Image: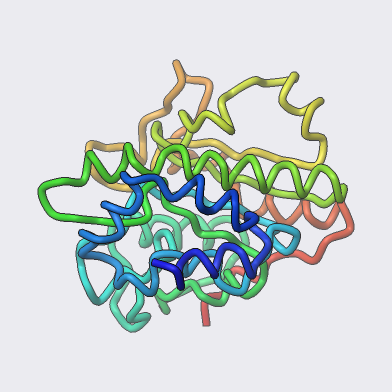
């Protein structure tokens, strides 16, 4: 538990006092009963990545139940030789469509090294108790996002946020506010869509009463728009190759 706290502190996400306040009894219960990822990987997304170094935030739902996949990075597989399925396969198809890159290696650590924070809305998975984990992590994740917005705005650094699916789009810290939100956070670009998963046809359904496009919509070009925004704000673009 203490080693996990140190990851957040040494990478400038929170002070020691803030970490102690965020580690509620519910969060500690989640960590203690976590089945995926391994306990040491729960904060993998933050390890070696400070808020000021983040250029892109991609939000997933919760860790894979598969031991060979879950390693603390949203959408990423620990074993990069496992062929992409479902959400990640659709993400790779969109990257090919957007920027012409054809990926097969499924470990996304190369993105993290360039400043992509791959954050799940629940950082732990436990069989038969996942609803508790999703609810328990909500406050923590909102604090992470608020911290990121604060740092990027203060430093006048660009940040692209990719919100895919209803759960991601409902996060309190990123609630849809249209023009008002852009005035408050001029260096933040939010790219919203339905979830890339094939489950319940999420990939092809728009959400938020049609305001948000389907992930498979050919006019939805998140990876292209992301790099255009970074470049326009004098930041290095993301190389979306995974290997």
Q: Residue at x 49, y 46 (%)?
A: 22
In the rendering, at what x and y percent does residue 84 appear? Answer: 32, 68
Residue 21, compared with residue 227, is above or below; it is: above
Does 197 sit left or right of 149 as displayed? left
Does 114 sit left or right of 110 as displayed? right
Q: Residue furthest top?
A: 209
- Tell me which corner region of the image, top left, top right, bottom left or bottom right, holds residue 127: bottom left
Q: Residue at x 46, y 41 (%)?
A: 164
Does 149 sit left or right of 25 as displayed? right
In the rendering, at what x and y percent does residue 62 appear? Answer: 33, 52
Q: Residue at x 39, y 41 (%)?
A: 195
Of 27 and 101, which appears nearest the observer? Answer: 27
Q: Residue furthest left?
A: 128
In the rendering, at what x and y percent does residue 81 appear? Answer: 33, 83
Q: How many marks?
A: 0
In the rendering, at what x and y percent does residue 12 appear? Answer: 68, 62
């Amino acid at each position: 538990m203490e080693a996990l706290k140190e990851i957040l502190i040494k990478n400038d996400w929170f002070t020691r006092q803030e970490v102690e306040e965020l580690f509620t009894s519910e969060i500690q219960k989640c960590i203690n009963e976590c089945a995926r990822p391994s306990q040491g990987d729960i904060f993998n997304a933050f390890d070696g990545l400070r808020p000021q170094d983040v250029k892109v935030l991609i939000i997933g739902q919760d860790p894979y139940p598969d031991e060979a996949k879950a390693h603390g990075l949203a959408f990423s597989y620990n074993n990069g030789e496992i062929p992409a399925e479902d959400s990640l396969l659709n993400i790779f198809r969109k990257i090919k469509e957007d920027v012409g890159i054809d990926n097969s290696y499924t470990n996304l650590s190369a993105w993290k090294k360039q400043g992509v924070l791959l954050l799940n809305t629940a950082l732990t998975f436990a069989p038969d108790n996942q609803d508790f984990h999703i609810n328990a992590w909500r406050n923590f994740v909102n604090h992470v996002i608020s911290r990121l917005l604060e740092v990027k705005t203060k430093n006048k650094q660009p940040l692209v946020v990719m919100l895919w699916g209803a759960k991601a789009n409902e996060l309190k810290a990123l609630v849809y506010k249209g023009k008002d939100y852009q005035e408050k956070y001029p260096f933040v670009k939010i790219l919203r869509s339905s979830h890339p998963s094939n489950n319940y046809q999420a990939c092809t359904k728009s959400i938020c009463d049609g305001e948000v496009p389907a992930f498979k919509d050919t006019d939805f070009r998140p990876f292209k728009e992301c790099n255009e925004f970074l470049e326009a704000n004098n930041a290095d673009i993301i190389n979306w190759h995974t290997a």
